[in-house]
C-alpha cells in the first residue's frame, strides 16, 4: 500500500474524530510559519524584519497595514531545481502572514526596504489628535 495514502487515511480519521480544526493547533510545529519575522519596538516606532530570500521582483511582495495589524503576502523561491533534494531547511512557497502589532500605526508613514534577503518595514505610532491629555473635573457628592 502507498505510504502517502496511509497518511491521508490516518489524517482523515483524525479529522473525523477530533474535528477539522484539530490540526490548526499544530500548524507551527508541523509546518513552520514563513516568513520568519522579528519585531522591535521603541516608544514611537516598530521595526519589522522579515526573512524573505530570493526576491527578484519587489512588486511581488504585498504589505498591508491596517491600524494595529500588518499582513505580508508573496512567494519565496530560491530558484534551484537541479538534482534531488537531500536536505531542505529553507522554506519556500507562497506565504501569507498576519502580525498583530503592539500599538496602532500610521498608514501614511511606512517605509519598506529590501536588502540581502531581509525585508525591513519601519512603522510609526499612530497618535490621534483626540488623544490629548484632557483634564477630568471631579464633582463633590453631598451627603444625604
Image (cartoon, rainbow, N blue to C red):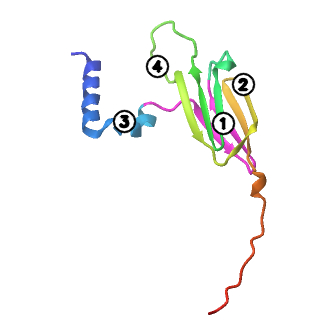
Give the Cα distance between marks 4 and 1.
35 Å
Whether tag 3 and tag 4 are in contact, CB under 8 A, the answer is no
**Neighbours of disc 1 within 10 Å: few (<14), some (14-19), many (20+):** some
Residue identifier under label 4: 87
Sequence-earlier tag: 3 or 2:
3
Give the Cα distance between marks 3 and 4.
25 Å
Bounds of the magenta segment: 31-52
Q: Is residue 11 above or below residue 83?
A: below
Residue identifier under label 1: 65
Residue identifier under label 3: 23
**Neighbours of disc 3 within 10 Å: few (<14), some (14-19), many (20+):** some
Q: Residue at x 64, y 48 (%)?
A: 102
Label 2: element kind: strand
Give the Cα distance between marks 1 and 3.
28 Å
Sequence-earlier tag: 2 or 1:
1
Which quadrant holds residue 137? Answer: bottom right
Whether tag 2 and tag 1 are in contact, CB under 8 A, the answer is no
Give the Cα distance between marks 4 and 2.
26 Å
**Residue 90 visible in image:** no
Give the Cα distance between marks 3 and 2.
35 Å
> Furthest residue to the left?
1
Whether tag 4 and tag 2 are in contact, CB under 8 A, the answer is no
Q: Nearer the viewer, mark 2 or mark 1?
A: 1
Which quadrant holds residue 68? Answer: top right
Mark drawn on residue 115: 2
Residue 57 among those drawn in magenta: no
Report whether 8 appears left or right of 63. Answer: left
Label 1: element kind: strand
Amino acid at each position: 500500500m502507498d505510504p502517502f495514502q496511509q497518511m491521508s487515511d490516518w489524517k482523515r480519521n483524525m479529522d473525523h474524530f477530533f474535528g477539522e480544526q484539530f490540526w490548526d493547533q499544530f500548524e507551527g510545529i508541523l509546518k513552520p510559519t514563513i516568513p520568519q519575522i522579528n519585531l522591535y519596538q521603541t516608544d514611537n516606532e516598530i521595526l519589522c524584519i522579515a526573512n524573505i530570500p530570493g526576491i527578484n521582483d519587489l512588486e511581488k511582495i504585498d504589505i498591508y497595514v491596517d491600524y494595529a495589524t500588518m499582513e505580508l503576502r508573496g512567494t519565496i523561491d530560491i530558484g534551484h531545481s537541479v538534482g534531488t533534494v537531500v536536505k531542505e531547511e529553507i522554506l519556500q512557497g507562497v506565504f501569507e502572514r498576519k502580525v498583530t502589532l503592539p500599538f496602532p500605526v500610521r498608514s501614511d508613514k511606512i517605509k519598506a526596504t529590501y536588502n540581502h534577503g531581509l525585508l525591513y518595514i519601519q512603522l510609526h505610532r499612530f497618535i490621534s489628535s483626540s488623544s490629548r491629555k484632557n483634564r477630568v473635573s471631579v464633582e463633590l457628592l453631598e451627603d444625604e
